[in-house]
Image: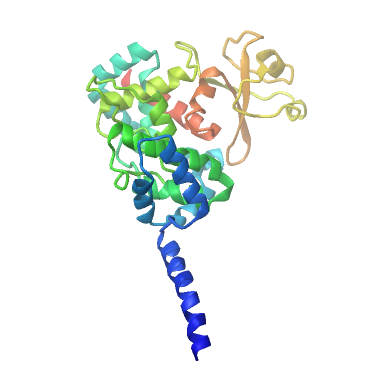
Amino acid sequence: MIKTLIILFCFIPMAVQAVKLESGDYRYREDVEAFITSVAAKSDYSEQELLDLFAQVKNQRHLFELMDKPAEKLHWHQYRKIFITDKRVQKGIDFWNEHQDLLKQVEQKYQVPAEIIVAIVGVETFYGTYRGKSPVFDTLVTFAFDYPKRAKFFTRELEQFLILAKEHNLPVREVKGSYAGAMGMPQFISSSYRNYAVDFDGDGQANLFDSLPDILGSVANYFKRHGWKAGEPVTFPLSIGNKQKLEQLKPGVKPNYTWQQLKTVGLKTTANLADDKPVALLRLQQKNAAEYWAGLQNFYVITRYNHSELYAMAVYQLSEKLKEGIS
């Protein structure tokens, strides 16, 4: 009997810890402790402050399915239906008309077209309507420590978020965002917030949650810092010549080819491109066949916001429809 009691008492601490871990308390994990020690050593957080934050984490494993099945895995004809809709176009035109003076100021300073800026917030959050409901801190903790294939990225973003919260006096436990931890109307991840957000309204703080000048200015700054070329086109549709030769080229978003190289496989466009112009070969799957586009530097810049060619094309095509509605 005594031996049985001893065994039971030995298992009680383990059972309690298991319950704590299941409920989201990450304090007792060695990898979390190492992270806390590291962040405390190079930030204004104390270890106790971080321990208290981690003790309150609610595991967000239900978001793994969304991460594993993003819209960017769809074919183009499926993806396009989500973002290029009459409702999104009309709301974007209304948004542009309402804020045209501000957009002109942003466009003038950063030399990024208003239609691109508006299209970004249109694709990201339907012009601020859907900003995400997931707790950013809990989400980043869960992905950093329980999602091995992207642990490095999310561990870095978790650290950036904690520092961001200190810098901007954000309530760590209350900030909500996307299933991947992106925040505000433009859906910046934490590192992007710290590196590219600007204080366009001049109040001393870059606020991507409530300040529209800061939001639009930050999107434009992001594009400028990533190499947007003012006045240059984004992409052109191509007509196919020799399909057999075309298969020798590898599609991608980076402008790794010259226009001359694409011409040699029979691709054509109505655009006037110099033979030495750097271009990317874009392949988008429609319902019955693939279509091809020439992506220029500005198309590549859009993919720095989201690395998918589907995303970049949706932003571009939405921007074109917005511009048509304004003119």
Q: Report the number of numbered marks.
A: 0
Residue 117 image-quadrant placement: top left
- Residue 321 screen position, x and y as percent: 40, 26
Residue 315 image-quadrant placement: top left
- Residue 222 screen position, x and y as percent: 42, 23
Question: Which of the two residues, 274 or 243, is positioned nearer the viewer here?
Answer: 274
Q: Is residue 156 above or below residue 55?
A: above
The C terminus is located in which quarter?
top left
Residue 277 appears in view: yes
Q: Residue at x 35, y 50 (%)?
A: 53
Q: Residue at x 46, y 56 (%)?
A: 61
Residue 221 image-quadrant placement: top left
Q: Is residue 231 above or below residue 43?
A: above
Residue 83 appears in view: no
- Residue 326 screen position, x and y as percent: 31, 21
Q: Is residue 147 above or below residue 208?
A: below
Question: Which of the two residues, 257 or 217, is positioned nearer the viewer here?
Answer: 217
Residue 290 placement, left or right of 248: left
Question: Which of the two residues, 247 or 137, is positioned nearer the viewer here?
Answer: 137
- Toward the front, the furthest residue is 2
Q: Is residue 181 above or below residue 316?
A: below
- Residue 281 screen position, x and y as percent: 64, 25
Q: Residue at x 66, y 9 (%)?
A: 275
